[in-house]
Amino acid sequence: MKELQKTSKISGFYKLPMKERIDYVKKFSNLTDDEISVFSSTMDLEIADRMIENVIGTFELPLAVAVNFHINKKDYIIPMATEESSVVAAASNAAKIARIRGGFTTEVSEPQMIGQLQLLNVSDVAGAAKKILDHKKQLLDLANQQDKILVDLGGGARDLEVRILDSPLGKMIVTHIIVDVRDAMGANAVNTMCEALAPMMEELTDGKIRLKILSNLADKRLVRAKAVFDKEKMGGEKVVDAFLESYTLASIDPYRAATHNKGIMNGIDAVIIATGNDFRAIESGAHAYAARDGRYTSLTKYHKDKDGNLVGEIELPLAIGIVGGAANIHPKARLCRKILGIVTAKELSEVVASLGLAQNFAAVFALSTVGIQKGHMSLHSKNIAVMAGAQGEEIEKVADKLVKEGKVKLDRAKEILEEIR
Ligand code: NAD
């Protein structure tokens, strides 16, 4: 292998033998031999047993890296854990096109999470709401006493908002506590604060606190990523127009938007899992945000710039951390952060949003041109070949024939296997 430069732009990375891919990532991210060996080992069962209940083993997913990413003028190799074929290749290809015009740029809001306290059975709703707001400082102080570490790091409870909601149970007061969680995902931190505030809220009012928990609609923790996709590289302005026609359906129709956003989450979940974050939290936040105006729509937006290039943007909430949860307990998650070279949750969220945009661009691009199956079929055909009983070199031979014939079906794979044998 030639002398390596610290660039994530690597042509034909997928064609390299796995050993050379590993060597590249090792050098790019300054990993030691011991660290590299962690990726091919399974998690210590004792660690697993401390993470969840009733453990009987561990469950593996392939871990790959997406290449070519250039985000805010820095190169990234992005680790992705996923079972779905084509996702990593598609992301790498989209990043390659995006880098022609400077790669991805991002904007991130403060890492603020929302905790909810639901107050019921209040006789004077307006009076109780006023009392809560009048005691904002005392309530925030009490919240901050729960997490001295967070406060020392510059985070902590920042604000209270009071909402009065009509419900089948009558009016209820829902108080939002806004907490800057710094580099944590923040659920435990916020939940602890919510529980600590409950008795004081009941004392201040004559109501009863029922729920006290984080909201996964983290709309005060938004990330935006943007990229320009070169029209020539896409195949000309007609392809850009075809792309925009495809995208338009996602912008107006929830049936299409759900699939469009699923494509975004193909990439996002994969890096979220690889970095030990909570993908259910990210999923629920993203989809709730996509429906924030009362109608579910696309998390991305596209338009043409004055030169005819395609401009893509994504905006979504990303409640992710680099401390807490499994982020530091899972040995591979720690190393995936090292591959990324990120040191803050903010930077991780910039990478995640950019990957989501790349993934979405790749899917809509394929759908607007050759269709999605072409890319899917080459890896899928290998799975079908294995299912048909192919072994060793047979796998490639059967898979190739399936793709050439354009019929990736198990019965045909079995026939080809018999012919070969
Ligand atoms: P945590 O409580 O394990 O860690 C966060 C704590 O680490 C902070 O409260 C702070 O005291 C400390 N800390 C040290 N260095 C820090 C830094 N640089 N920035 C911020 N905090 C720092 O984890 P968490 O992030 O509060 O909670 C995440 C976990 O909660 C995840 O595992 C998630 O699955 C789980 N969870 C999620 C939900 C939900 O999404 N609705 C609900 C409950 C639990």
Image (tube, rainbow, N blue to C red):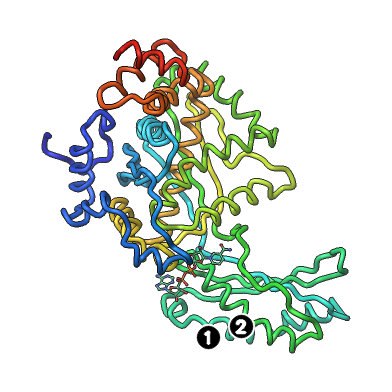
Binning the other alpha carbons within 10 Å of mark 2 as few (below 14), some (14 to 19) or many (20 upward) gives some
Q: From what the image shows, is residue 91 above or below residue 318?
A: above
Answer with the quarter of the image where residue 67 lies: top left
Q: Is 26 left, or right, of 159 in this rendering?
A: left
Rendered location of residue 335, percent (x, y): 29, 56
Rendered location of residue 98, percent (x, y): 40, 33
Dot 1 and dot 2 residues touching (CB under 8 Å): yes
Query: How many numbered circles are shown?
Result: 2
Binning the other alpha carbons within 10 Å of mark 1 as few (below 14), some (14 to 19) or many (20 upward) gives some
Provide the secondary structure element on which disc 1 rests: loop
* Residue that badge 1 annotates: 145
Q: Which of 33 and 251 is in front in this view?
A: 33
Q: Distance between the residues labelled 1 and 2?
A: 9 Å
Rendered location of residue 82, percent (x, y): 42, 42
The tag on residue 48 is none
Q: Which residue lies furthest to the bottom in this view?
A: 203
Give me the residue at 69% from left, 87% from top: 200
Quadrant in which the C terminus appears:
top left
Is residue 164 something one can see in this rendering? yes
Rendered location of residue 366, percent (x, y): 48, 24
Give me the residue at 48% from left, 51% from top: 107
Q: Is 214 left, or right, of 233 in this rendering?
A: right
Question: At label 2, which amino acid type do we have?
Answer: Ala
Q: Is 344 left, or right, of 176 in this rendering?
A: left
Q: Which of marks 1 and 2 is in front?
A: 2
Give me the residue at 41% from left, 57% from top: 276
Quadrant in which the N terminus appears:
top left
Provide the secondary structure element on which disc 2 rests: helix
Q: From what the image shows, is residue 341 above or below residue 268?
A: below
* Residue that badge 2 annotates: 196
Question: At label 1, which amino acid type do we have?
Answer: Gln
Is residue 308 something one can see in this rendering? no
